[in-house]
């Protein structure tokens, strides 16, 4: 498969944006992609930011022709825990029709579909690419770039493939995304680590206190998030929306996750909890002795990473304020609590029936032989809300991954059939757009 | 100081018993100590165990003379977090009258006082040493050795220095120790790490569940341990005992720990909480992403180390049963919980007025110019209960450390004045014992 070889090269670059030691690799991924686009006739620009560069590229075939803006990201999540990968994360391999590598699905593989779709395509459509290297760390510099370059980015439609199909063999158009508020919490007790025999009974224990905080953040019985005011902005999905939703195979999901129940917020279906309800999850915790055997220590400090997925009309900054105030109010006497805001992203809802969505639906139906389903997604693409506000044009979210792609986890993969059909559908979209306009 | 040089050598051996990679170093410490005792006229035997050897040594000057058995341990705690040590943990240094090294106080330095006290001593006292290399991992093999070698270990008194003086310049005799029950808890959720966007709302989160467990183990408001039946065996201290207790300078303790309050169980004084009340402390916790920046993962598993200090008449095995049953009952649906028992030790109370305690009190008063105070200790020396049961003779606990010695923490130290006066008091004890018997 001709489109595969360069993608393997792209995936072999460990462009982990959160790791300061990989700064050079992240840049290398941007430069590599720029070269590929130049070979397709694009003019490219690398815009420096304080961290990782933004790649902008355009191929203007005709003033006045319909213009497509493709957004994607060339950075990837960290690969740890490395020992759980069956093949090395940055040595991509194809096995049983699947491509395994960090970034295969999120997002290099999906982004690559938009590049590969242009190969030999002669449709009279102007194409622009906006590709960042900071998506996995919350796109700190892209919003400003988007606001300052509205004219340059002007387009009739934005295409984004950075998500998942609802199920295998199920072409999918996504019209909603959750937002994100990510915090790091540090808790200090005594000035130094203490012996649990000599001081147990009078010493603050930051691990114990983290436990108290966690229990007060989410109710064990109801699954409700207990931060005062947290649910205030939540807009319930409309009846029309609910009718659009496909039905979730809960038994298949349980099998996939290897669980007997799907724990979550009381009173809502699993699908609604995934798409239209906010959540809170600790993403990491540490403190004290983690080694072999026993150590009777009361640690001086402990910490955790804590993120919340948000839905319209919650605001990440406002939620961070609420969470921080609540955590500080909960902090028991004898402890010092500090909250660091790592990043956020606004939730977004788009029109499932906009003209380009209808066009992409036709392209998908031609390629797959069946119409697409309409979904929201639980994940966050921070820039979507920014693009929506700045450009004011319809956004088409065409996920080419699958829910079991192991995003952000070991053994990330992309099914090649979805890559191939994705490329075909994108090509067809360009052709339909050139023929019919919007 | 002649006694110091060999001690520096002893302390430079990284005999960390919990670390499989240091097995050879642990053995080297035993062999080193054996050589020193041989030089003092002892016959030594190294008893192999499945892990670290037990060193037994005896110097019989006369059948029928009073016999002292000294217990100590040549193993030490792990040194991490290494970056917080001001000087390397296994490169001992003397600074401002203090000896800094891992093991300086716990227990190589205090054990060494009993060896150094014999240098040039001609008192007609038989001396035996029982020194293990597994104290810091719960003495798994010593109890069987003690039970199987009662005849060999027979003595009129057991001397142990593996604890602390109540305060600086305050000679101290200890008549009670807390016990220990140490568990490791593993919690599993889904079969693999999950993306918090794609699965947040239906995925079990083992970190969150650890928080719920911790909150149900210890009440945030009262500090009470919530394991059903946990307090049942607890024997309150007698009125006579309370009268023996010195008073605790709570303000000084707060300053030492760098805290504004001394959190603990409601309804008991800090001193009683340290000496005569059981406690529960998580000693380590881990799960998810602990690196730089953010990673939006819901981890498949998380875990913690959890220990309880016990008081008479609680039994470590019985408490482990209660804790395990409670944790399993608390484990929410969707999680798998496993409990591993790492080690335990029985609490012990001895007679503060036994004849050898009285003799040691006289020796201390002669050396320090003031009578000793009588204390319990919050820590655990698992073998003390075993020796008490197996030999049935009085036990003298003579702590030479101080509460601020940084046991099990970075920058462990021993004040040299306490080492010197300890050696002098032990010598004087041998002389008084030879002269007066018991």
Image: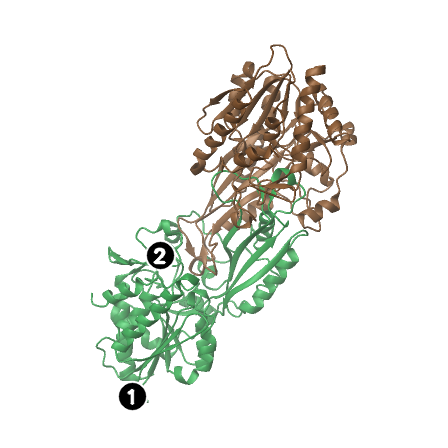
Chain colours: A brown, B green
In this view, B424 is above or below B61: above
Foreground pick, A321 / A407: A407
What chain does mark 2 sit on?
B
Foreground pick, B175 / B47: B47
What chain does mark 1 sit on?
B
**Cα–Cα gap, marks 2 and 1:** 41 Å
| Residue at point 73%, 29% (across, down) | A367
Mark toward the start of the polypeptide (2 vs 1) = 1
A396 to the left or right of B269: right
Q: Please state which of the two labelled residues, at mark 2 or mark 1, is closer to the viewer.
A: 1
Q: Residue furthest top?
A: A63
Does the CB distance between marks 2 and 1 fall below 8 Å? no
Q: Residues within 10 Å of mark 1 (few under 14, many from 20)?
A: few
**Which of the 4 image quadrants contains residue B54?**
bottom left
Foreground pick, A289 / B23: B23
How many numbered badges does the structure rendering display? 2
Which x, y percent locates residue B95? Answer: 25, 55
Q: Residues within 10 Å of mark 2 (few under 14, many from 20)?
A: some
Foreground pick, B277 / B291: B291
Which x, y percent locates residue B86? Answer: 31, 50
Q: Which residue is mark 2?
A: B404
In this view, A363 is above or below B313: above
**Which of the 4 image quadrants contains residue A325?**
top right
Which x, y percent locates residue B200? Answer: 64, 40
In this view, A419 is above or below B247: above
Q: Is residue B414 visible?
A: yes
B210 to the left or right of B354: right
Element assignment for label 1: loop
Which numbered circle lies on residue B62? 1
Q: Is residue B267 visible?
A: no
């Amino acid at each position: 498969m001709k489109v595969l070889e360069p993608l393997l090269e792209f995936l072999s670059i460990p462009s982990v944006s959160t790791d300061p030691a990989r700064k050079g690799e992240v840049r290398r991924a941007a430069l590599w992609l720029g070269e590929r686009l130049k070979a397709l006739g694009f003019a490219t620009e690398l815009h420096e930011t304080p961290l990782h560069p933004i790649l902008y590229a355009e191929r203007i075939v005709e003033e006045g022709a319909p213009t497509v803006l493709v957004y994607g990201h060339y950075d990837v999540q960290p690969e740890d825990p490395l020992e759980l990968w069956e093949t090395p994360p940055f040595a991509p391999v194809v096995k049983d029709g699947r491509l395994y590598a960090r970034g295969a699905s999120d997002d290099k593989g999906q982004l690559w579909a938009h590049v590969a779709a242009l190969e030999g395509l002669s449709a009279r459509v102007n194409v622009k690419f906006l590709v960042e290297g900071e998506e996995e760390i919350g796109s700190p510099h892209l919003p400003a770039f988007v606001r300052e370059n509205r004219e340059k980015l002007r387009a009739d439609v934005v295409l984004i493939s950075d998500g998942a199909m609802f199920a295998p063999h199920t072409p999918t158009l996504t019209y909603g995304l959750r937002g994100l508020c990510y915090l790091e919490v540090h808790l200090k007790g005594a000035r130094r680590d203490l012996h649990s025999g000599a001081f147990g009974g009078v010493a603050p224990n930051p691990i114990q206190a983290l436990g108290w905080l966690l229990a007060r953040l989410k109710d064990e019985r109801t699954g409700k998030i207990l931060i005062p005011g947290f649910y205030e902005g939540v807009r319930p999905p409309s009846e029309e929306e609910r009718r659009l939703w496909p039905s979730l195979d809960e038994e298949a999901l349980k099998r996939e996750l290897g669980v007997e129940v799907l724990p979550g917020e009381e009173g809502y279906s699993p699908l609604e909890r995934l798409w239209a309800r906010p959540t809170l999850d600790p993403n990491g915790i540490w403190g004290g002795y983690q080694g072999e055997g026993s150590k009777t220590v009361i640690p001086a400090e402990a910490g955790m990473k804590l993120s919340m997925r948000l839905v319209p009309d919650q605001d990440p900054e406002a939620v961070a304020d609420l969470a921080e105030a609540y955590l500080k109010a909960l902090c028991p006497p004898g402890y010092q609590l500090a909250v660091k805001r790592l990043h956020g992203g606004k939730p977004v809802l788009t029109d499932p029936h906009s003209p380009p969505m209808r066009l992409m639906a036709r392209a998908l139906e031609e390629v797959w032989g069946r119409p697409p389903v309409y979904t929201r997604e639980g994940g966050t693409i921070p820039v979507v809300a920014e693009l929506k506000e700045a450009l004011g044009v319809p956004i088409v979210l065409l996920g080419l991954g699958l829910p079991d792609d192991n995003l952000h986890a070991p053994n990330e993969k992309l099914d090649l059939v979805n890559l191939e059909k994705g490329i075909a559908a994108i090509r067809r979209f360009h052709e339909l757009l050139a023929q019919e306009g919007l």
